[in-house]
Amino acid sequence: QVQLVESGGGLVQAGGSLRISCAASGRTFSSYAMGWFRQAPGKEREFVAAISGGGSSTYTADSVKGRFTISRDNAKNMVYLQMNSLKADDTAVYYCAAGQWALIRTNPNYWGQGTQVAVSS
């Protein structure tokens, strides 16, 4: 069982930066791939970025490529999403997820409760 708690969301101006974090419980954190997803009002939840258990592989959605970077610190059981050049369209609730690398983009096993990111234009 893995418990995930996101933090760091807030209000930021367009063009600004924000880093959100996800703290994971459990002693097997490094065995899980981690992902970030987001859900904007009235829209379906969408995949944003993923990182493998050891951190050597990452995958980023085309919509945020070049602006968002996922990283992890296995010693601290933390995963991060650095978001730069934010746009109003990035406004959403951001969720942290954990699962198998092959399925992290489509079917994670565990979800956090989400953190709100609002970008003002």
Image (tube, rainbow, N blue to C red):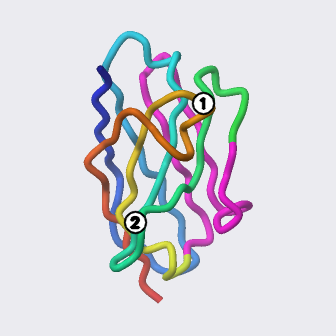
Q: Is residue 112 left or right of residue 102?
A: left
Dot 2 or dot 1: first in sequence order is 2
Determine the secondary structure under disc 2.
strand
Identify whether 95 is placed above or below 104.
below
Q: Is residue 86 left or right of residue 120?
A: right
Tell me the residue that label 1 is attached to: 101
Q: Nearer the viewer, residue 41 or 24?
A: 41
Q: Amino acid under label 2?
A: Gln
Q: Nearer the viewer, residue 47 or 74?
A: 47
Q: Is residue 69 magenta?
A: yes
Q: Residue at x 44, y 61 (%)?
A: 38
Determine the secondary structure under disc 1.
helix
Instruction: Give neighbour class at mark 1: few <14, some 14-19, many 20+ (Cα, 10 Å).
Output: many
Q: Is residue 71 magenta?
A: yes
Q: Is residue 118 left or right of residue 47?
A: left
The range drawn in magenta is 59-86
Q: Residue at x 31, y 43 (%)?
A: 112
Q: Name the outermost residue toward the bottom.
A: 121
Q: Name the outermost residue toward the top.
A: 27
Q: Residue at x 54, y 55 (%)?
A: 47
Asked where in the image residue 5 lies, by quadrant, the reply is top left
Tell me the residue that label 2 is attached to: 39
Q: Residue at x 71, y 61 (%)?
A: 65
